[in-house]
Amino acid sequence: MRIGIPKENHLEEKRVALAPAGVDSLVRTGHTVYIETNAGSGSHFSDEDYIKTGARIVYSPEEVYQRSELIAKVSLAKDDELELLQEDQTIFSFLHLAVGRKQNVEKLLKKNITAIGYELIESEGKLPVLHSMSEIAGQLAIQVSERYLESTGKEGRGILLGGITGVAPAAVVILGAGVVGTTAARAALGRGAQVIIIDNDLQRLRKVDSSFGRKVTTVMANPYTISRGVKFADVLIGAVLIKGEKAPHIVTEEMVKQMKTGSVIVDVSIDQGGCVETSRITTLSDPVFIQHNVIHYCVPNMPALVPRTASYGLNNAALKYIQDIAENGLEDALSRDPGLSKGVCTYKGYVSNEAIAKAFDLEYRRLHIFSKN
């Protein structure tokens, strides 16, 4: 199979879809990999690193798309890249189509693109590709909030996350006990912070209690407890995820108004629309804004802060799916792996994800795959 890796150009994205090790695995099994020049430079992978693995360097995005049957990306293609997609191509990427624009979905449908969203692929009830990025985002949420709690630049509260003898640590309130939330909790505990996790799933909260030896305070989510937690927080981490759907605004603007002056919100859910009503997308170069005296950090591609680690993580999680399609063909791979098929958003000109169809009032058709073997 011919596999293409274009250079990312969305929201200052520095990750790359496959590390040289992943390209090496594909080339060794007889596949051809085209990679746009400098596609790995943001993660400190040189063209020479890829050439050594047998990749073919090309010098324009047009050439990548025209030569390839399968495109591997990190972020959803921008308008100009969507135009470059070829009829009947397959694209792997973090898509988040349900919170995107209807015209993007329509372009995929018009060209019969098989669009597979990494964030939707399942395995044993988990989201294996998203998991690696969520681990990174959880750690970064604490790293970022610690920086903005300082009193320099953006009017932070001027407090140390872990406190000192005789001075209380910061209160870190985390909304959501999934991968992002539990990873953030672990990082915050390591810094010495006081940590509270709020979730509406009692089983998840029990798991948190067990995992952290009751060092984390767990609270069942409802409007009252969320409001109290938000008001108490020095740092608020939004880690709400509803698979494939827009995140609900469980933190209202009125709640934000009650927060401490100089407190920090890190809305990790922003790639799904955000779980805080006052959140709006920011970028790596301009990551924060202040509203109601509260610092908001709402970067949707947080893992791009550590692109080399993130690229390796994405490579490790996604390679087997790319390799399966390359080795066995799209239809056979999808028919044998129901978890992979759940990642398919568009297929043969129709929407195969119910949440996306509902979001844009488009026809939904259940995915029916028949193996060619």
Image: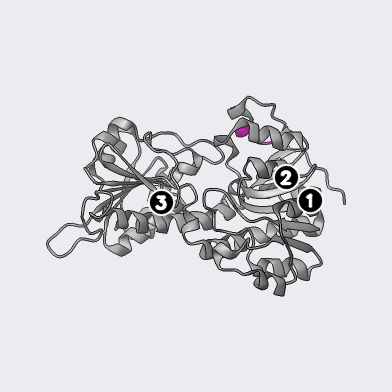
Up-down relation of residue 284 to residue 368 (above or below): below
* SS for dot 2: helix
Mark 3 vs mark 1: give the one in front: 1
Decide whether the magenta segment is chiefly helix, strand or loop.
helix
Q: Which residue in the structure is indicated by mark 1?
A: 66
Q: Which residues are magenta?
A: 352-356
Q: Is residue 133 left or right of residue 230?
A: right
Residue sitting nearer the eye, 199 or 140: 140
Pick the quarter of the image with the N terminus.
bottom right
Amino acid beneath label 3: Gly
Q: Residue at x 70, y 45 (%)?
A: 341
Residue sitting nearer the eye, 179 or 96: 96
Tell me which label, 1 or 2, sits earlier in the chain. 1
Tell me which label, 2 or 3, sits earlier in the chain. 2
* SS for dot 1: helix
Q: Which residue in the structure is indicated by mark 2?
A: 84
Q: Is residue 196 magenta?
A: no
Mark 2 vs mark 3: give the one in front: 2
Up-down relation of residue 361 to residue 174 (above or below): above
Q: Is residue 354 magenta?
A: yes
Q: Residues within 10 Å of mark 3 (few under 14, many from 20)?
A: many
Q: Which residue in the structure is indicated by mark 3?
A: 181
Q: Are marks 1 and 2 in contact (CB under 8 Å)?
A: yes
Amino acid beneath label 2: Leu
Q: Are marks 2 and 3 in contact (CB under 8 Å)?
A: no
Q: Is residue 193 visible?
A: yes
Q: Residue at x 41, y 33 (%)?
A: 249
